[in-house]
Amino acid sequence: EVMAVIERAQQSLNKATELGHAWSVTPTLIDAAEAELAARRPDAALVAAQRALVTANAAIAQAKSEQSAWQARVPSQQP
């Protein structure tokens, strides 16, 4: 189960990176999950993996939101 969550987090991180919005904390969380798993602490590994997945998915959501939101921040050229 933990490895499946780590893999999904990595896939989401890859997608966020493609979109140009990856968060720097996500790879750290993935590394922490893998380290906890190697240290035979599956509960801690699962927590880190789930946090990595959440941050990666949030980065994807941010990227999608920014595709249109940036226009609201650009001053209008109308008089």
Image: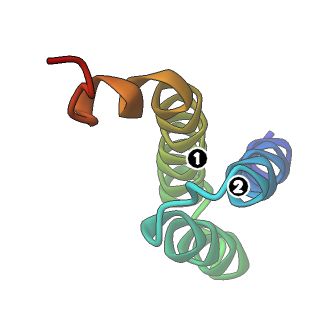
Look at mark 2 in the image and give the residue it sits on.
Answer: 13
Query: Split into 4 quadrants, where in the image is the C terminus?
Result: top left
Residue 31: horizontal and vertical position, in percent? Answer: 62, 78
Q: Residue at x 51, y 67 (%)?
A: 29
Q: Is residue 16 left or right of residue 22?
A: right
Gap between marks 1 and 2, in whole Å?
5 Å
Is 18 placed above or below 61 here? Answer: below
SS category of the residue bearing label 2: helix
Q: Residue at x 47, y 33 (%)?
A: 66
Mark number for residue 56?
1
In the image, taking residue 48 as reference, residue 7 lies left or right, namely: right
Could you tell me residue 64's position as x and y percent? 59, 28
Identified by mark 1, the residue type is: Ala
Q: Are marks 1 and 2 in contact (CB under 8 Å)?
A: yes
Q: Nearer the viewer, residue 13 or 50?
A: 13
x and y percent of residue 67 in the render? 56, 30
Q: Amino acid at mark 2?
A: Leu
In primary-sequence order, the first of circles 1 and 2 is 2
Count numbered badges in the picture: 2
Question: Badge 1, how many Cα within 10 Å: few under 14, some, many 20+?
Answer: many
Q: Which mark is residue 37?
A: none
**Residue 73 in picture, x, y percent from top left:** 24, 33
Judging from the image, the colouring scheme is rainbow
| Left or right relative to 77: residue 10 | right
